[in-house]
Amino acid sequence: MKRIMKEAMGDCSTVEEFRFLVRCRECGRTWHSSPVRFSKAGAEPKTEGMSAIFRTLYERERDAAREKAAAEASEIFSRCPVCGRLVCDRCFLICEDLDMCIACAKTLQVRGDIVAGEAFAPRELPAGPIGKASTEESDIK
Amino acid sequence: MLLYLNRRWGKIDAAARGRSIGSRLALCWLCMVLAVLSAALLLLSATGVLSHTASQFGETAALQQKNTAAIFTAQMDVLTAQGIELSNTVSGEVESFLAGRGLSFDALNDNPELIAELEDMLIPALKSAMEGSTCSGAYFCLDATANTSLSTSETSRAGVYLRYSGLRSAHPGGTVTCFRGTVDAARRNGLQLHNRWNPELNTSLIPGYRQVMAWDGDRLSGGCLWTERIPLLDTWESVTLLCVPVRDGAGNVRGVCGMELSDLYFSLSHSTVSGSYGSFIMLLAPMNGDTLLLDKAMLGSTEGTDLSASGEMRIQSGRDYDTFTWNDTTYLGKYQIVPGRLADGHPLAAVTLVPESGYRHQVQTARLGWTLGSLGFLIGMLVLAAALSRRFAMPIAQGLEAAKSCEHDWQPTGIREIDELTVYFHSRLRESRPEDALPRQVESLVSELIDRSKGLTSSERIILRYYAEGYTVKDIPGLLFISMGTVKGHNSHIYSKLGVDSYDALKAYLDVLRRCGRLEELLQSGKQRSYV
């Protein structure tokens, strides 16, 4: 799951901090991971060698932040076993036989309970302790 | 342990030694069959089928009748023979008496002295014939009278009629009196005169007299007649007379002689025969169609009954016996025509009968005996069957209790099959229950949990299986590609359906089920669908 999530995540990190996003394929809303500040943010490399070291360090910390962000995203995103899309808990149904996204449920005429919130409630991604969701599209680096 | 094994093997031995359930059943069934038979016996007894009283009475009456007919026939035959002998004697004496004097038979008329002399000569022979016979009297009369000028000379005939007086028993004896005959002849022979004495006989009172006098035959036996019962003149007695012709040398009938059977003598000589059906009465009666003429019959002793020699008795033939009705009184018995001529031409019947009341009493007694015997037998069989059933059922109930209980100190029932079954049950119970078996409360809890798990969906069952395999909640999103929220949603459903309140409680239950070896029952029960 974490691998799928990492593949589906977008990277919106800056020089100062690392941050990732996942977009619900059903409702289109995006989820942003919690920002992780780069340890050497604001520091100017004095030498060319130091600059190379900073780049290497940045890459390492970004991979670690990606891992963390994938774990966070796994808390609220599910992969629909029917269509294979990643959908948020607002768009995923617990059904009798097979859990699936709302779209597939409508197509297959299967009833189920939305994992988070009511089925016809305004669509807002759950505000968890980690990460943040918004309806805006973010640029992916 | 050794003690326990000894006791156990002892019970197995006892089970092997006990009586078979089949033998007990057979005994019980035998009693029931006997009870049913006795019930049928009782029914047959109550209806009188078994007592066979009618046929038995018929046989008894027939036997008695046979004896009666034989007695009557023998008596009549003997008396007839003796009467013929007497006739020959009288004929010879008269013939020689008249020949010696050169007189014809007609010379006796109007000659009292000659008649007296002839009677004097004949009385010893008459007395001798009387004493040698089983009769109550003997007589002879000749076709002559002492005084032809009398108006009654046509029916008054000279002769001698001797009778026993004061009969007390069937054996004739006692004083011989002269009922008819001349005084001189009686006195010369030392005879007392009867208190109703007359010198001559009145032949109008002898029904067969004229027939015998008119008889013309060779053999005297062909001319013999018996009269019906006739009243003896001037007395309270009735008699039956044997009439035998007395012929002269030329073969002409010159008189009649014979024996007398008085009703008293007949009654004394033919007493009742006691039997189980009462006292059998014997009688000798002229028969007119299906009617017995009792007013002309000779009756044996009728002691204990109201039967008397009067009126008529109707006969109704039956299969086993005949029914005789006389004056609204019913008698049962048999009858048989015996050889012998009656003066009036009626056949003579020897009859043996018994009052119906005696027969009915015997029937009721026999039926009561059979009924009581059958009833006793039935009660005995029922009691025996009940006792055997109780003895049979009680060990079975005890055996079942012993089989249901797991106690080791059960008592053998004595029925081999039951004891073997109990031993078998106990051995199976010991085998099926391991030492670390769960307490009964836990067993019921497990069963309830498995029962509840039938409501789980396929997704929930798959998640439950992961938990059973040791995965944690955190592992499920990665395994099923679902969010943690989805997992928590499934968990809440699983908890509510199984009746547990937390993940830790669920894990504890799963552990218990794994220990009982019934985890698969939980995971596989209900609908089984794959998670795609």
Image (cartoon, rainbow, N blue to C red):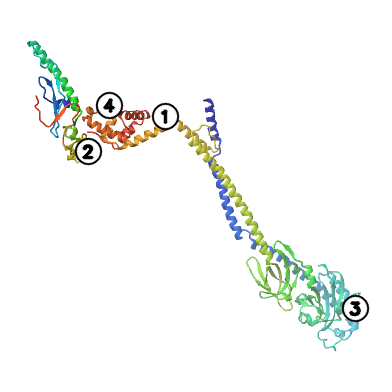
* Residue closest to the eye, B287 or B85: B287
Q: Earlier in the sequence, mark 3 or mark 4?
A: 3
Q: Nearer the viewer, mark 3 or mark 1?
A: 1
Q: Is residue B49 above or below residue A1?
A: below
The disc at residue A112 is 2
Seen in the image, is B529 located left or right of residue B131?
left
Respond whether the residues carrying marks 2 and 4 are from the same subunit.
no
Can marks 4 and 1 be said to lie on one chain? yes
What chain does mark 2 sit on? A
Identify the residue under disc 3: B185
Q: Whole-percent x and y of residue A53? A: 11, 13
CA gap, disc 2 to disc 4? Answer: 25 Å
Q: Secondary structure at mark 3?
A: helix
Left or right: residue A46 versus residue B215 is left
**The residue tagged with tag 2: helix, strand or loop?**
strand
Q: Are marks 3 and 1 on the same chain?
A: yes
Mark 1 = which residue? B437
Amino acid residing under circle 2: Gly
Q: Quick one: label 4, few (<14), some, or many (20+) residues within 10 Å?
A: few
